[in-house]
Image (spheres, helix red, strand yellow):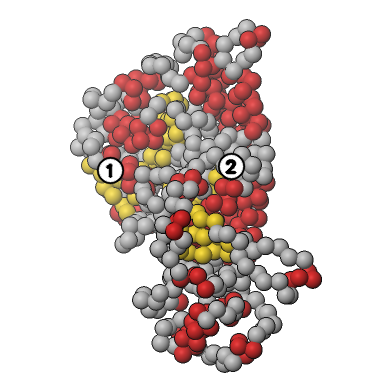
Amino acid sequence: MNVHLDPSLNEVHLFTSPSYDDDRCASAPRRPAAPRVIRPDHPALHGSLTPPVDCPPDKILNFSPGPTNLPPAVEAAIQSRCFPDQSEKRLGSMALSHRSPEFGSILKRTLRLCREVMQVPPEYEILFTQGGGHGQFAAVPMNLCPTGREVASYVVNGTWSKRAVEEASKYCSPHVISALNDDGSCTSYPSIERIQSEINPDSAFLYVCSNETVNGLELHQLLPRLNCGVPLVVDASSDFTSKPIAWREANVGLLFACASKNIGHPGVTMVVVRKDLLGRANPFTPGVFNYETNIMAENVWNTIPTFNVDVVGIMMEWIKENGGMDSMEGTSIAKSELVYDLIDNSDGFYSTPVAKESGYRSRMNVPFCVVNGDEALTDLFLVECWERGIVGLRTVTPFGKSIYQRVSLYHGVSYEEVVVLTNFMKEFAAKHSISKVVEEPTPTSTLATLPESPLSSSQVFRPDSPLYQRMMDLCLAGNNNKELFTKLSSSPNAVNDPALTWPKNLKVNQYSRVTNDMFAPPPASLR
């Protein structure tokens, strides 16, 4: 399969070479099939999670950053327990009143399992709230800053912590410890020494996001207890239940996690708050966000999402039956290492912004780009994934389009599914690699007249290069000399002259075909 960028259409043309019998291979003319155009409105380029009906696998492989799948055993239990057959003569949790004894039993069971699985000490209360992570961006300062003038320290190390501090500024005076780079990106956390030196010791709390899904940064262990004794507030929405939590050692005052990554369906957020921090809410805090109000009402001050709470309980039961936190952490490490090892050993075909040496690579969300963000190959990669039933690598976000795609590895993604993805990534890289040299015999005397060039690829591609001019003459004269181009770098960075008429991101490799119409206008049907 060959990639042809049409600069006038800003589209990718894919050419599939016909197959030939061995006897015909040497003599039969190899003409590309009719071009296939990947149009900008292709569903795979806009986050579609519905692949074509004829895609090979029986199951869609969903690597979405959330909401996402739960493990198959959990989904089966939800189907049987929450949606009973009429013959069972009972109601599922979706139909139960939040004050009924039936739901009361479900709520108690879920709370017990959460405390057991996450080893939550007795000095903490567990709440099920609504409003998601964004709701907690406001609820945390409203509950811990009674006058609204209190200082709260925020570690800003990515997209979600930045959003949190923006929301918190309405309800407290944030003191920011920023890990953002000069260009606004973030590829690391500030050191504990820097946090110790920069935190305002009078802060009501220190806020961290333990896993930044967009940036691919994760604290694999929470910060140790600070010298100043300021309690830690943790947004653990995307890594909750993927590793043990040192509640006391890290001086966790409050932790929250929206359910739609690892513990359930969207619509419920779990809040774990230490009892000594209750009773501090700003008097203007809405009752639905007031922790103390809801604890005193035993989680049913208002109508909580009964079905979602039931699902959290089923998920916790599955985690317990499958080895608990140690097992979940081991699986998370194994899955993420598969992807990172593939990226690190791809000779630059794939890359990720977070260095291995940083120690902060996320096990939950792996951002990666294809050939430094090459748009044509990225689009082709996404389309071929989509056609194989691999979805969720690009999703629509409020943060605009990025060169990075994301592999999200929550509990609903099995190790075997990650193997399928990485095998495809290897196959795609091998097919479109720009660094390999293919040795082929020279089939024409014309090529024999070309001298061996000692020049670098960037020099070869300069328009004033004699070798470049000679190559262009051969191409435009109609010679089928694709072998000539298999030895040249196709990296956009190797093109020094921006006025060069060859599209900068055209991939020239052993799968590319030089044709007379490569620079011609598109056919009238495509204009």
Furthest-front residue in this view: 524
Asked if one can make out residue 153 in the rendered structure from this viewpoint, the answer is yes
The residue under the point 54% across, 56% down is 36
Compared with 261, 35 (above or below) is: below
Task: Check the image and report above or below for 477 versus 352.
Answer: below
Q: Secondary structure at mark 2?
A: loop
Among all residues in the image, which is located at the extreme right? 23
Q: Which residue is mark 1?
A: 166
Asked which quadrant contains residue 342, the reply is bottom right
Left or right: residue 149 compared with residue 452:
left
Residue 351: image location, x then y, percent? 51, 62
Res 92 label: none
**Depth check, front residue: 241 or 477:** 477
Q: Does residue 72 appear left or right of residue 190 in this picture?
A: right
Badge 2 crowding class, 10 Å Cα cut-off, few under 14, some 14 to 19, many 20 or more, is: few
- The answer to whether 105 is drawn above or below residue 73 in the figure is above
- Which callout, 2 or 1, points to the residue nearer the camera? 2
Splitting the image into 4 quarters, where does residue 63 fall?
top right
Dot 1 alpha-carbon crowd within 10 angstroms: few under 14, some 14 to 19, many 20 or more: few
Residue drawn where x is 30% and y is 34% of the image: 138
Q: Which residue is mark 2?
A: 52
Q: Mark 2 belongs to which amino acid?
A: Pro
Residue type at the position of mark 1: Glu
Instruction: Give 368 or 141, whichever is nearer the viewer.
Output: 368
- Residue 231 % position (x, y): 37, 40
Q: Residue at x 71, y 71 (%)?
A: 28
